[in-house]
Image (spheres, rainbow, N blue to C red):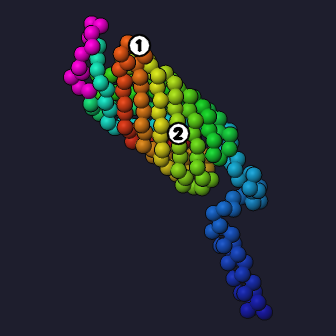
């Protein structure tokens, strides 16, 4: 009888271990496994992001008293801080809007106001992320703002709705107020927190 009980416990423990090891099976609040459709919507609802970035910047010219002049510092180091808020439609697609403060070299500070679309490529704990921002920037460079980001999202286990992420960014601001169009091109590395 003892052998049967030990064998039964071994089979039960093995089954529980194998079930827990399966990364595709997600458990709901009621302890029951989620269907495939439910697994795709575990992140659905309001979502917010806070991002900090830094990297290399370049712009071509400045205007002094209405005349084009070569900038004494056309290349430099820039920083940015952004916040984005919106709606996560499922575990893959987010749409929202945001604002921030960034700079193109040390002398050109601007504030972009933008729409944001983000795609989580996989429904996994670690997933590639693509992000596109487009809008308008005001400040030293006032004009069209575009940003493309690619990176990875790392879900936090204790808070499934939360994650940290790291991205590489290529952004462009074209100053539409200047007749000849001065532009700002930025290559940034960013980290962020998703809540």
**Residue sitting at 50 percent across and 42 percent down?**
193
Specify whether residue 66 is painted magenta: yes
Image coordinates of residue 137 in percent, x first then y, are: 45, 21
Left or right: 132 as drawn, with respect to 78: right
In the picture of the structure, the residue carrying the numbered disc 1 is: 177
Q: Secondary structure at mark 2?
A: strand
Is residue 85 visible to the viewer in this orientation of the structure?
Answer: no
| Mark sitting on residue 60 | none
Rendering quarter of residue 33: bottom right
Q: Give the residues in magenta.
A: 64-74
Rendering quarter of residue 182: top left
Left or right: 86 as drawn, with respect to 37: left
Q: How many neighbours does mark 2 have within 10 angstroms: few (below 14), some (14-19), or many (20 or more)?
A: some
Residue 107 versus residue 15 in the image, above or below: above
Q: How many neighbours does mark 1 have within 10 angstroms: few (below 14), some (14-19), or many (20 or more)?
A: few
Rendering quarter of residue 90: top right
Left or right: 51 as drawn, with respect to 90: left
Task: Judge by depth and name the residue closer to the eye, 177 or 122.
Answer: 177
In the picture of the structure, the residue carrying the numbered disc 2 is: 131
Image coordinates of residue 73 in percent, x first then y, are: 23, 26
Is residue 119 visible to the viewer in this orientation of the structure?
Answer: yes
Q: Secondary structure at mark 1?
A: loop
Specify whether residue 143 is painted magenta: no
The CA distance from mark 2 to mark 1 is 27 Å
Image coordinates of residue 119 in percent, x first then y, are: 58, 43
**Quadrant in the picture for the C terminus:** top right
Task: Judge by depth and name the residue closer to the eye, 48 or 182.
Answer: 182
């Amino acid at each position: 009888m003892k052998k049967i009980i030990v064998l039964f416990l071994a089979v039960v423990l093995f089954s529980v271990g194998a079930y827990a090891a399966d990364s595709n099976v997600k458990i709901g609040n009621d302890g029951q496994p989620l269907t495939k459709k439910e697994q795709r919507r575990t992140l659905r609802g309001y979502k917010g992001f806070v991002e900090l970035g830094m990297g290399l910047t370049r712009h071509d010219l400045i205007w002094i008293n209405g005349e084009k002049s070569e900038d004494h510092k056309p290349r430099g180091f820039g920083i940015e801080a952004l916040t984005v808020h919106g709606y996560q439609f499922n575990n893959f697609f987010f749409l929202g809007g945001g604002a921030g403060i960034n700079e193109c070299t040390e002398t050109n500070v601007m504030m972009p106001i933008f729409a944001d679309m983000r795609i989580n490529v996989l429904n996994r704990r670690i997933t590639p992320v693509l992000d596109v921002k487009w809008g308008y920037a005001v400040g030293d460079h006032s004009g069209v703002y575009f940003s493309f980001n690619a990176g990875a999202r790392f879900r936090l286990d204790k808070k499934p709705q939360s994650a940290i992420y790291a991205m590489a960014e290529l952004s462009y601001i074209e100053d539409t107020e200047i007749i000849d169009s001065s532009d700002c091109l930025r290559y940034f590395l960013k980290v962020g927190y998703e809540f």
